[in-house]
Image (spheres, grey):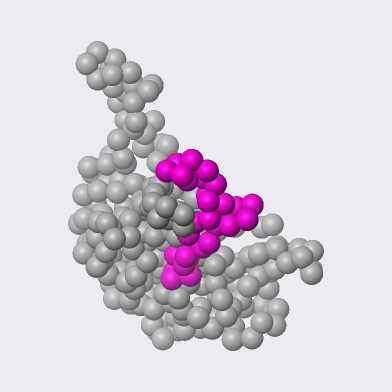
């Protein structure tokens, strides 16, 4: 496959974080504990991009609820035809029944039991990155194909798949950037980006930069038919929280060093 924009995003975020940590002064072992065993303090990368997912599992035998948290820098969501990103996020957090060979090991019952499980957002990040899973393996073709389904991504977004103990469940987001895949499949094509700057939108295509109308964003939702052909579709969406300003981001960089 060609260089994937999502893989590059993960590499870039992790690499920047590693550089920041490597340039921090090492804590001494006197009074500060063993630097080799201590957990590094968060960097501005964490402050800006990191959120927390919680996996909630309820045993159907004893009704005991258990949860497990995990950090994320982006959410990877499956897509359906003629839907919205809000619908995709609801499906991301839809209830899953664990049964048969996939039963849940309940600590309270001390045995494997049927259970219900769902993933919900516990901490909403400053910048929410959503990766639309547009490349998937199809057995009938014996290869990966591009899924060009039409998925509407609004200019304003609120997450409704938050946990009951979410830190900031009412946080509102504004769309600020979209990475777009142009092409008919995962092994060919091209990436471009649109970015909002000073209340207008710019399209970046290699060394070409053009101003576009906001209405042009609709062109990157995807195709209404499932015919495999070249398309320009939103692939990674970046939403910035309304309560976050450029000053907040700069402060996070300073504090996170």
Q: Which residue shows up at 34% across the image and 63% down it?
A: 162
Q: Is residue 212 visible?
A: yes
In the image, residue 179 lies in the stretch drawn in magenta = no
Q: Residue at x 35, y 77 (%)?
A: 155
As drawn, 87 above or below 107 = below
Residue 74 percent across, percent down from the top left: 44, 57
Identify the residue shown where x is 28% and y is 58%. Answer: 166
Determine the residue located farthest toward the top in the rendered image. Answer: 30
Residue 160 location, quadrant: bottom left
Q: Position of residue 87 (x, y in %)?
A: 45, 76
Q: Tell me the residue at 53%/61% (across/down).
A: 97
Pick the quarter of the image with the C terminus. top left
| Residue nearest the observer in this picture, 100 or 95 | 100
Residue 165 spot, x, y in % from top left:
27, 57
Is 35 situated left or right of 206 in this image?
A: left
Looking at the rendered structure, the number of numbered marks drawn on it comes to 0
- Residue 167's spot in the image, x, y percent? 25, 56
Say if residue 204 shows up in the picture. Answer: no
Q: Is residue 23 above or below residue 9?
A: above
Left or right position of 141 against 95:
right
Residue 109 included in the magenta stretch of the image? yes
Magenta-drawn segment:
89-117
- The quarter of the rendered structure image containing the N terminus is bottom right
Q: Quadrant of residue 164?
A: bottom left
Q: Is residue 97 left or right of residue 38?
A: right
The residue lying toward the viewer, choosing from 99 and 173, is 99
């Amino acid at each position: 496959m060609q260089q994937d924009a999502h893989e590059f995003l993960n590499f870039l975020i992790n690499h920047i974080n590693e550089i920041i940590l490597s340039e921090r002064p090492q804590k001494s072992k006197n009074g500060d504990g063993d630097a080799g065993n201590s957990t590094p303090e968060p960097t501005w990368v964490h402050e800006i991009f990191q959120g927390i997912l919680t996996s909630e599992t309820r045993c159907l035998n004893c009704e005991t609820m258990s949860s497990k948290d995990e950090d994320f820098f982006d959410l990877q969501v499956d897509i359906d035809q003629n839907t919205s990103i809000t619908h995709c996020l609801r499906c991301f957090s839809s209830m899953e029944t664990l049964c048969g060979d996939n039963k849940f090991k309940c600590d309270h019952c001390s045995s494997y039991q049927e259970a219900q499980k769902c993933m919900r957002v516990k901490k909403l990040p400053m910048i929410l990155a959503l990766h639309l899973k547009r490349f998937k393996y199809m057995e009938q073709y014996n290869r990966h194909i591009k899924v060009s389904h039409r998925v509407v991504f609004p200019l304003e977004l609120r997450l409704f798949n938050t946990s009951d103990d979410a830190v900031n469940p009412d946080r509102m987001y504004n769309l600020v950037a979209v990475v777009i895949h142009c092409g008919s499949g995962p092994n060919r094509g091209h990436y471009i980006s649109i970015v909002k700057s000073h209340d207008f939108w710019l399209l970046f295509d290699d060394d070409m930069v053009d101003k576009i109308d906001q209405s042009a964003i609709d062109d990157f939702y995807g195709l209404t038919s499932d015919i495999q052909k070249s398309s320009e579709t939103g692939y990674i969406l970046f939403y910035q929280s309304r309560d976050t300003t450029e000053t907040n981001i700069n402060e996070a960089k300073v504090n996170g060093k």
